[in-house]
Image (spheres, rainbow, N blue to C red):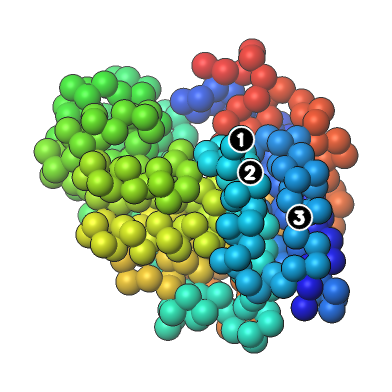
Amino acid sequence: MKIDRIETIHLRFEYADGFLYAGGKCTARVTSLVLVHTDDGRTGVGAVYSHPGLVELVVKKQLEPLLVGDDPTDTETLWWKMYRLTRWYGRKGAAMSALGGIDTACWDLKGQAAGKPVWKLLGGSTPSCPAYASALLWKTPAELGEEAGTLIEKGFRRVKMRLGRGDDYDRPAVLAVRKAIGANNDVMCDGSMRYSLDAARELGKFLAEQRVFWFEEPFEPEAIDDYAALRGTIGIPLAAGENEFGLQGFRELLRAKAVDIVQPDVCRCGGLTEAKRTADLAREFGARVAPHTWSDAATVLANAHLVGSIDHGVTVEVDQTGNPFIEELLEEPLRVVDGRLQLSDAPGLGIRLKQSTLDRYRLSDPDTLPDGSYSDMVFGKKYLV
Ligand SMILES: [Mg+2]
């Protein structure tokens, strides 16, 4: 089996109203799929979230010519080949995410060729993994309570909410969600990088009183000393890593004893190969792994295969903000039963893309992305906070 060509499919969905979050005003969602086609007619699927124009440039202009003719199942060799080519302008950011999309697609092919699901190739034994609903953006406490209740009714046992809006908002918001989900379900709180160390300490103690499952990313990713100072002082786990790339970045976090839970994202941090390396390193440091996951259902599955294969995998994130690339991208929609995302025994990643969704949302020119579009960051000056 050899790589014949690599295809990119960029998708964009425009909201009627959009939503406000800590980074700005989101009016549309974008994601990029990377399809690795082989000479024997197979297709592996990976995903990337970054600016589609950057993904297009790196995948089509740089990496596809490098990889055509190679064996896609040789994931380790291919990963280093891609990394070495992009190292001088990559290592963190778009190039790392883009090579990761190809790497993840190659893992899909590796599973298909072996006739095994990726979770099994990685050493897992159960076709499911814990999952949590990621939603609860900045809304009134009453709206948050109602939404949290709905998420529990859908089968989730953990929900994540966004804070970072100030004390007047944060505390009533947490109380509303805790009340709505009851004592037997979990809530996580995302700080969206908006706290000082002192403010995070104060809020962290309140979150511990509310038995919050983890406190996520109170600081910017560069503020490793602040993470290290906070960790262990608030009585609940500290989680971070969605804005980190590559093993080297996570090694720095772990060496500094800055986090209890690392959040690498297969579709951002450098692919399944790099996320697995990160998980292995986390184990050495006694840290747990809960991948960040956001833009599409292919991403959810890729991260879920990793979580389901490691015993220090905590849970996988499932966007529940009304994103068609979660709800409508797959022929068989994601299924969460009693807090667990169901995986299958299908070879590879088990991703079957729904053609009608690809046709409906395909972005014709990845370079001309309308402002307000969002791929875990908002593009366009007037939409930024
Ligand atoms: Mg987050």
Up-down: is 342 above or below 168? below
Up-down: is 154 above or below 1? above
* Category of crowding for the residue at label 3, using alpha-carbon neighbours closer than 10 angstroms: few (below 14), some (14–19), many (at least 20): some
* Marked residue nearer the N-terminal end (2 or 3): 3
| CA–CA distance in space, label 1 to label 2 | 6 Å
Q: Position of residue 310 (x, y in %)?
A: 38, 71
Of residue 244 and residue 124, the one placed in the foreground of this image is 244
Number of numbered discs visible in the structure rendering: 3
| Direction from residue 104 to residue 6 in the image, left or right | right
Q: Quadrant of ligand 1?
A: top left
Q: Residue at x 59, y 23 (%)?
A: 25
Give the SS element for disc 3: helix
Q: Amino acid at mark 3?
A: Leu
Give the SS element for disc 2: helix
Answer whether residue 250 is visible to the viewer in this image.
yes
Give the SS element for disc 1: loop
Q: Residue at x 35, y 36 (%)?
A: 217
Q: Residue at x 66, y 67 (%)?
A: 106
**Which numbered tag is attached to residue 89?**
1
Identify the residue under disc 3.
66
Q: Quadrant of the N terminus?
A: bottom right
Tell me if label 1 and label 2 are in contact, CB under 8 Å. yes
